[in-house]
Image (cartoon, grey):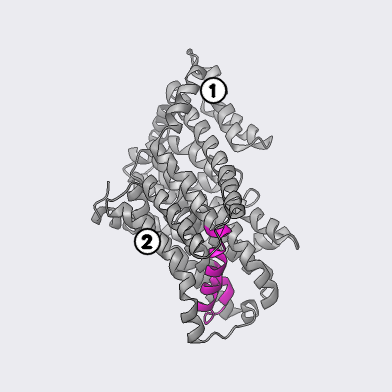
């Protein structure tokens, strides 16, 4: 049963079938092969029950919040302000890519949206300032991955639904690892530019007065992030309600900036519908597959198989991480999460690991999948917006950042409290 499942999944991927269709077809095939009951008859009820889940409302709202900030020009001004504040560091604009990605990630929840936005803003500056292509492009692609780690994260909402864990606890658990990973990215750029000054580009001199004048462009995104996250941890609103408050704040900010036009709203709504449609279709297909896997007993069989290998808990975890590192090279990360999490989460719990901690590890592995060729989505996003040069430049550029991600995974394995300390000490539901 397990071998047939793997062969079918790999076959669908090899045929370049879209993620949602692959997951749905796999579920239907397994139901027809191994279930005496007609599980397909449950598809309508599952789709309705899943789509009626209140937590899913947060996904289009978080997407819309990010789109409003982009369409209103707030993101562009934010990037300029960040570049002024980090100009003193070696590799100033590359550090601006990381810093601006972290800020935008705190209001978008999407890795691809973060990479696309920062690419549009940063690439014209790269040409002007004489930065070498590979590391600069790598900083954009790697910074984009912060979109699914820094709260609010769409991938974390999906994982929370699958693993039945608290979204606020996941957000808290991701906070410290997100700060550490952002710092590792910046440290990597600084060290690279100190070792090879030719990578640092033209250093721009910025006065203290110019930095202070740029603060109004930094504060609004931070204020929206504080609102969205603050009302969750203050017990004032749920994740979905906080997302709605974030959209209202983004609309108010766009109106204050004079950018709230019919054309801007249409662009933001259209982009939101496209992204949300993709995410929800994958999620609905995944819930049907999860239902089939549980019905035919594959989940239980896999847990029994892994526990029967007599590996230590850490050995099992390392095997799971290796599995995801390989799978991330060939599969869309959201599809990878929704397809495999129902299989791996029971194993992780059976081995005594905390599912909230594993949720953060899972998101870090998804980040790696966004960068590793041949399917690394952020690589294609950066190259498509760049629209010139060789794709291999982006691949070379992300290699050092992949090492930083591996280091972060190692730190998570050695010090689980990096993720668990905050959820343990802050009372959230």
Q: Nearer the viewer, residue 192 or 379?
A: 379
Task: Report the residue marked by disc 1.
Answer: 30
Of marks 2 and 1, which one's residue comes earlier in the chain?
A: 1
Toward which corner of the image does residue 385 lie, by quadrant?
A: bottom right
Residue 427, numbered circle: none
Residue 314 appears anywhere in the view = no
Residue at 41% x, 60% y is: 225
Toward which corner of the image does residue 75 lie, by quadrant?
A: bottom right
- Judge from the rendering whether residue 121 lies leftward or rightward of residue 244; answer left or right: right
Look at the image and say whether residue 70 sits in the magenta stretch: yes
- Judge from the rendering whether residue 312 lies leftward or rightward of residue 88; answer left or right: left
Task: Report the residue marked by disc 2.
Answer: 226
Residue 120, percent across and down? 64, 62
Residue at 39% x, 33% y is: 308
Residue 157 appears anywhere in the view = yes
Residue 23, percent across and down? 56, 32
Q: Nearer the viewer, residue 64 or 2?
A: 64
Residue at 47% x, 65% y is: 182
Q: Nearer the viewer, residue 92 or 292?
A: 92
- Cα distance, mark 2 to mark 1? 45 Å
Q: Which residues are magenta?
A: 69-97
Q: Main structural element of the magenta stretch: helix, strand or loop?
A: helix
């Amino acid at each position: 049963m397990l071998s047939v499942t793997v062969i079918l999944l790999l076959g669908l991927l090899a045929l370049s079938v879209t993620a949602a269709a692959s997951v749905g077809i796999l579920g239907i095939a397994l139901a027809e092969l191994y279930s005496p009951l007609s599980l397909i008859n449950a598809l309508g009820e599952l789709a309705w029950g899943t789509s009626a889940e209140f937590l899913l409302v947060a996904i289009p709202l978080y997407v819309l919040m990010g789109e409003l900030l982009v369409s209103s020009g707030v993101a562009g001004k934010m990037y300029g302000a960040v570049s002024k504040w980090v100009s003193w560091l070696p590799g100033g604009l590359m550090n601006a890519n990381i810093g601006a990605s972290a800020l935008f990630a705190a209001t978008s929840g999407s890795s691809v949206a973060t990479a696309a936005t920062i690419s549009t803003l940063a690439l014209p500056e790269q040409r002007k300032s004489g930065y070498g292509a590979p590391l600069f492009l790598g900083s954009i692609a790697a910074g984009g991955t912060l979109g699914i780690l820094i709260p609010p994260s769409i991938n974390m909402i999906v994982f929370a639904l699958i693993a039945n864990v608290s979204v606020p606890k996941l957000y808290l658990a991701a906070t410290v690892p997100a700060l550490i990973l952002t710092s590792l990215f910046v440290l990597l750029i600084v060290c690279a530019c100190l070792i090879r000054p030719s990578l640092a580009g033209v250093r721009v001199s910025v006065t203290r007065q110019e930095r202070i004048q740029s603060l109004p462009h930094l504060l609004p995104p931070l204020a929206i992030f504080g609102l969205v996250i603050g009302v969750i941890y203050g017990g004032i609103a749920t994740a979905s309600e906080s997302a709605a408050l974030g959209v209202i704040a983004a609309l108010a900010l766009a109106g204050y900036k004079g950018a709230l036009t019919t054309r801007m709203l249409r662009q933001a709504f259209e982009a939101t519908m496209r992204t949300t449609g993709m995410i929800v279709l994958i999620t609905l297909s995944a819930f049907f597959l999860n239902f089939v896997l549980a019905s035919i007993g594959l989940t239980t069989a896999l847990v029994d198989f892994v526990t029967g290998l007599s590996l230590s808990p850490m050995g099992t975890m390392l095997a799971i991480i290796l599995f995801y590192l390989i799978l991330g090279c060939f599969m869309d990360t959201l599809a990878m999460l929704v397809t495999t999490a129902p299989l791996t989460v029971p194993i992780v719990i059976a081995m005594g690991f905390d599912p909230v901690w594993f949720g953060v590890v899972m998101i870090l592995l998804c980040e790696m999948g966004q960068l590793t060729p041949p399917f690394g989505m952020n690589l294609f996003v950066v190259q498509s917006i760049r629209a010139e040069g060789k794709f291999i430049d982006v691949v070379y550029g992300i290699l050092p950042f992949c090492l930083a991600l591996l280091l972060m995974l190692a730190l998570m394995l050695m010090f689980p409290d990096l993720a668990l300390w905050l959820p343990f000490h802050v009372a959230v539901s």
